[in-house]
Amino acid sequence: MKIFVGSDINPASTLQILQTGYWFNSLPDELRIAIMAAAKIVRLESGQQLFFQGDSEHGLYAVISGGISISRQREDGKEALLTIIDSPNWFGEITLFDRGCRTHDAIAVSKTVLVEISGKALDQLLSEQASYWQYFGQLLILKMRTLLDVSEDMALLSNAQRLVKRLLLMATSNNEITGHSKRIIELQQEQLAMMLFITRQTTNHILKNLERHGLIKLIYGKIEILDIKGLQHYVEHSS
C-alpha cells in the first residue's frame, strides 16, 4: 500500500531537487507552478510496490530520494529488469497518453520518497490548458530516445561498453547534467547484470577491471563514479 503524506512536503527543497532534472527545468514557469500545486508526497519502504503491471491508474511520479525498479515478472517467475529510476527523474507518462494499463511493476529498491501528480490532477490541468500536452509528450520522447540508444548499443557495442554507458546514464540521472566527477550509484551488481542481459560473473569482471583503472570504486551495494571523462573515453575507444 502506498503511503501518502501531503502535509510535510517542503516545497522549496523539493522544487530544488526537481529543477536539477532536464525535463522539469525546461518547463515554463506556470506549468512548474501548477505541477507543484498538485503534488503529493509518497513514501515507500524498501520492497514496497508503487504499482503493478496491469494497474489502470495514470498518475505521474518523480523520485526525490531512493529509487524505483521498473521490471516485469514472467509466469515462470523470471524477472526482466528494465531500469532503476533515481532522483530527479520522472516516470509513468505512458498511461497518460494511451489510457492503458501499467506496462511494468514499479517497486522501491530502498526507502524512497516520490512526488505524485494524480491522474485526476493531470486531466484537470490538461483540460484547462491543452498546450501543456506538448511538454508531457517531450517527457515521453526523452524515454523513447534512450530506449532507441540502448537498442542500438545491444547491436554495436561490447558488453563492457554497454555497461559503462549504463553507468554514465545513471550517473547523469537520465538527462541531468551535474558537472560532478563523482557520484554514488546505489545498485547491486546482480541488478546491473539483469538490466544489460549479461551474467553476474561477466558484470563483476568488467566492474573489477574498471576499478583497477581508477574509473570507479566498488562499495557494497553501490558503485562510486570516480572519473566521468575516463568512462566516456572508455566507451569511445575500447572494443
Image (tube, helix red, strand yellow):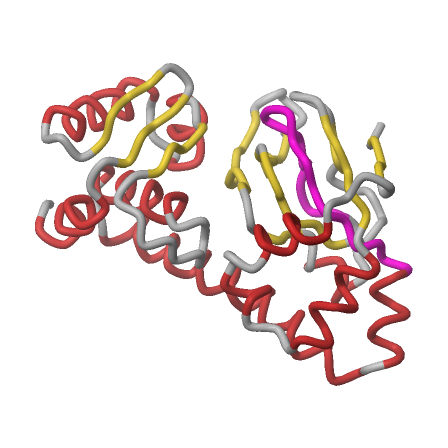
Q: Is residue 108 magenta?
A: yes
Q: Residue at x 83, y 59 (%)?
A: 38
Quadrant showing the C terminus = top left
In this picture, is 121 found above or below 188?
Answer: below
Q: Which residue sits furthest bottom?
A: 131
Direction from residue 98 to residue 181 in the image, left or right = left
**Residue 42 higher or lower than 219, as above or below:** below
Q: Is residue 33 magenta?
A: no
Q: Which residues, given as a range, are shown in magenta?
A: 102-120
- Seen in the image, is 93 located left or right of residue 238? right
Q: Position of residue 167 (x, y in %)?
A: 33, 41
Residue found farthest to the top? 220
Q: Residue at x 45, y 28 (%)?
A: 186
Please tell me which residue lies in front, 63 or 178: 178
Q: Where is residue 99? Give x, y as percent.
A: 81, 61
Q: Nearer the viewer, residue 27 or 149?
A: 27
Residue 3 as seen in the image, left or right of residue 199? right
Which x, y percent locates residue 229? 18, 50
Q: Nearer the viewer, residue 103 or 36?
A: 36
Q: How many marks?
A: 0
Q: Quadrant of the N terminus?
A: top right
From the top left corner, tell me how far across and down residue 132 is, in percent. Answer: 73, 78
The residue under the point 59% across, 37% down is 65
- Above or below: residue 129 compared with residue 120: below
The structure residue drawn at horizontal position 85% and vertical position 57%, both measured from the top left corner, is: 119
